[in-house]
Image (spheres, helix red, strand yellow):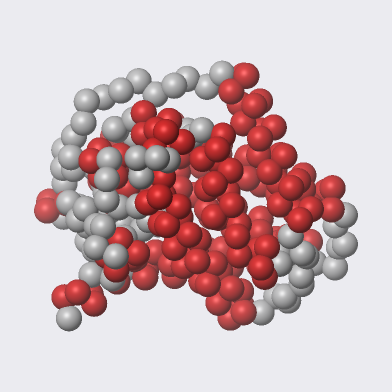
C-alpha cells in the first residue's frame, strides 16, 4: 500500500501538467479559433511563446519570488545544502545564440510534423496532454539515464556544472544535449501530429515546470527536492519527476516531500516544513 501511495505525487504532477496545458490551450483557442495561421507565422508564434515564457517565468522566480524572504523560505524545497556558486550572467551574445537555436528548432519541428486539428473538447485535450507528459517523462528518463553512461557523459557535463541550481540552469546544456532533449520532448508530435494551440500550451507549461524544477523551490508543479538531489548527488532521479525512477529503482529518495495535493501544501504550511 505504502508503495502505491508513493506514486501519488508523481501522478499529481502529470495531472497538473495536463490540466494546466488544457487551460492554456483553451485560452489560445479562444483567440485563434477560425483563423488559418500560415506555417511561417506558426513557427514565429511557437518560438515567441517558448522564449517569452522561458524568460518571463524564470525572471519571476529568480527576481520576484526568491527576493521575497517569506515566500522564498516557505517555498524552499532544497534540504541538502551545497556550496554557493555564481551562476553565469546573461550576455547579449548568449541570448541571441539561444534564440537563434530555438527559432531553428521551431522551424524544423513544425515543418516536419504533420498538422492535425483535434478539436476543442476538454476531455480530449486533457487526455492528449496526459498521454504526452507521461510519454515525454518516459523518453526523458531513458535519454537522461543514457547520458549518464560513461561513453555519453561528455554531452551532459555542461548541464552538471552546477551542484546548486537556479531556474536558468534549465537551459544550460550543450548543443547536442539540446537536440536530444528537444527530440525526446517533441517525439509524440511526429507520431500524432501537432495543433498550434496544443504545442504552444505545451511549451509554456514545459518551461514552467522545467524552470521550477531547477529553482530549488516548490511553487506549483514540483513537490520535492527530486531534481535538486540529481544535481547534488549526480546520479539517480533521471526523470522529470519520480514516477519512472520509482518504477525502475533509480530513485534517490527526496528528502523533502511536501504533501501531495495542491493547494494543500500552501494550506498546511507548518513548522515541520520550515527550513530557515
Ligand atoms: Zn543529469
Ligand atoms: Zn537539471
The answer to whether residue 99 is above or below residue 256 is above
Please say whether residue 66 is visible from this viewpoint. no
The answer to whether residue 8 is above or below residue 178 is below
Residue 99 image offset from top left, x and y in percent: 66, 33
State which quarter of the image contains the N terminus. bottom left
Residue 264 image offset from top left, x and y in percent: 29, 65
Q: Is residue 169 left or right of residue 198?
A: left
Quadrant in the picture for residue 30: bottom right
Residue 107 image offset from top left, x and y in percent: 76, 46
Q: Is residue 100 left or right of residue 80?
A: right
Q: Residue at x 27, y 45 (%)?
A: 235
Depth check, front residue: 269 or 129 = 129
Q: Residue at x 37, y 51 (%)?
A: 145
State which quarter of the image contains the C terminus. top left
The answer to whether residue 237 is above or below residue 171 is below
Residue 20 image offset from top left, x and y in percent: 52, 63
Quadrant in the picture for residue 239: bottom left
Please say whether residue 98 is visible from this viewpoint. yes
Depth check, front residue: 101 or 210 = 101
Q: Residue at x 27, y 40 (%)?
A: 234
Q: Residue at x 42, y 40 (%)?
A: 152
Q: Residue furthest left?
A: 272
Amino acid at each position: 500500500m505504502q508503495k502505491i501511495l508513493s506514486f501519488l505525487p508523481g501522478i499529481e504532477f502529470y495531472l497538473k501538467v495536463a490540466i494546466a496545458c488544457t487551460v492554456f490551450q483553451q485560452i489560445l483557442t479562444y483567440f485563434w479559433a477560425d483563423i488559418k495561421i500560415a506555417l511561417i507565422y506558426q513557427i514565429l508564434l511557437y518560438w515567441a511563446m517558448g522564449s517569452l515564457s522561458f524568460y518571463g517565468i524564470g525572471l519571476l522566480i529568480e527576481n520576484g519570488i526568491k527576493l521575497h524572504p517569506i515566500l522564498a523560505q516557505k517555498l524552499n524545497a532544497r534540504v541538502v545544502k551545497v556550496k554557493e556558486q555564481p551562476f553565469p550572467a546573461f550576455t547579449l551574445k548568449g541570448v541571441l545564440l539561444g534564440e537563434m537555436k530555438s527559432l531553428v528548432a521551431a522551424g524544423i519541428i513544425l515543418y516536419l510534423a504533420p498538422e492535425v486539428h483535434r478539436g476543442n473538447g476538454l476531455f480530449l485535450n486533457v487526455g492528449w496532454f496526459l498521454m504526452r507528459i507521461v510519454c515525454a517523462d518516459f523518453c526523458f528518463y531513458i535519454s537522461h539515464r543514457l547520458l549518464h553512461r560513461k561513453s555519453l557523459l561528455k554531452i551532459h557535463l555542461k548541464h552538471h556544472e552546477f551542484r546548486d541550481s537556479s531556474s536558468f540552469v534549465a537551459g544550460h546544456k550543450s548543443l547536442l544535449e539540446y537536440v536530444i532533449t528537444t527530440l525526446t520532448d517533441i517525439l509524440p508530435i511526429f507520431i500524432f501530429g501537432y495543433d498550434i494551440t496544443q504545442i504552444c500550451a505545451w511549451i509554456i507549461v514545459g518551461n514552467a515546470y522545467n524552470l521550477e524544477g531547477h529553482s530549488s523551490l516548490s511553487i506549483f508543479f514540483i513537490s520535492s527536492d527530486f531534481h535538486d538531489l540529481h544535481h547534488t548527488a549526480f546520479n539517480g532521479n533521471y526523470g522529470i519527476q519520480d514516477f519512472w525512477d520509482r518504477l525502475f529503482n533509480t530513485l534517490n529518495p527526496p528528502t523533502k516531500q511536501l504533501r501531495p495535493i495542491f493547494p494543500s501544501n500552501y494550506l498546511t504550511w507548518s513548522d515541520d516544513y520550515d527550513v530557515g
